[in-house]
Structures are given as C-alpha cells and as structure tokens.
Amino acid sequence: MRVSEFQKLIRDIYFEKDSRRGVDPTFRWFTEEVGELARAIRKGNRGNLEEEFGDVFAWLASLATLEGVSLEQVATRYASGCPKCGRTPCECEEDKER
C-alpha cells in the first residue's frame, strides 16, 4: 500500500472523529502512542512493536490530514538522500540535539 493510500484509508475511517476532536487533542493521542512505542522498543516484543509502529503511523496520518499535509509529498524531502548533506548514507557530523 502506498503512503497516500494509507493516509486516505485512515482519513476515511477516522476523519470525522479526528476533526471533531481537533488537532491538539489528536496530537496528544499521537504522543501517547509514541510513548507506547517507546515501551515496546524497550521490551523488544516483535508483535507489540509492529502494532505500536502501526498505531503511531496511523495517528501521524490523522494529524497530517487534519493539517492538510500529504505524507507522500513530504517524504519526497528524503528522495535524494539526507536533506542536509544530500548523501546516502548521511555524512553529516553527529548532532547531539537530534
């Protein structure tokens, strides 16, 4: 499934609820899912990892849709390699703030 198809699917399923809830509460749900992903990473349970990555991706798609952003379009930022150095793999100096 293409990213644009996934974003449309998530829009079809959740847009009405997400738009009623609004961006800020939807963002809080997204951050909660990121926290669940962090716990799954620490535990290393493959099934739980896949579930949490899916949830984070779905909530990200919901947020992008609410803000009118195409995830497929923004992914093109990386099509030519690292957006900073333009290389694949990235040759930027390690950034402690990242």
Image (spheres, helix red, strand yellow):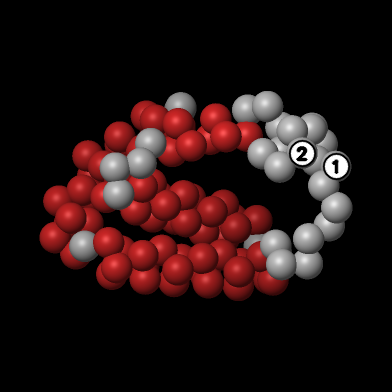
How far apart marks 1 and 2 lie (CA) works out to: 7 Å
- Residue 84 visible? The answer is yes
Residue occupying image coordinates x 44% and y 71%: 32
Q: Against 88, is 49 above or below? A: below
Image position of 11 (left or right of 6): left
Label 1: how many Cα within 10 Å (few below 14, some 14–19, many 20+): few
Question: Visible in this render: residue 51?
Answer: no
Residue 20 position, x and y percent, is 14, 60
Return the mark for residue 91. Answer: 1
| Left or right: residue 80 compared with residue 8 | right
Q: Secondary structure at mark 1?
A: loop
- In percent of width and height, residue 72 lies at 45, 32
| Along the viewing direction, whichever of 15 and 78 lies nearer the viewer | 78
Along the viewing direction, whichever of 20 and 73 lies nearer the viewer: 73
Tag 2's secondary structure?
A: loop
Mark number for residue 85? 2
Whichever of labels 1 and 2 marks the residue nearer the N terminus, that label is: 2
The answer to whether residue 20 is above or below residue 64 is below
Note whether 97 is above or below 3 in the view shown: below
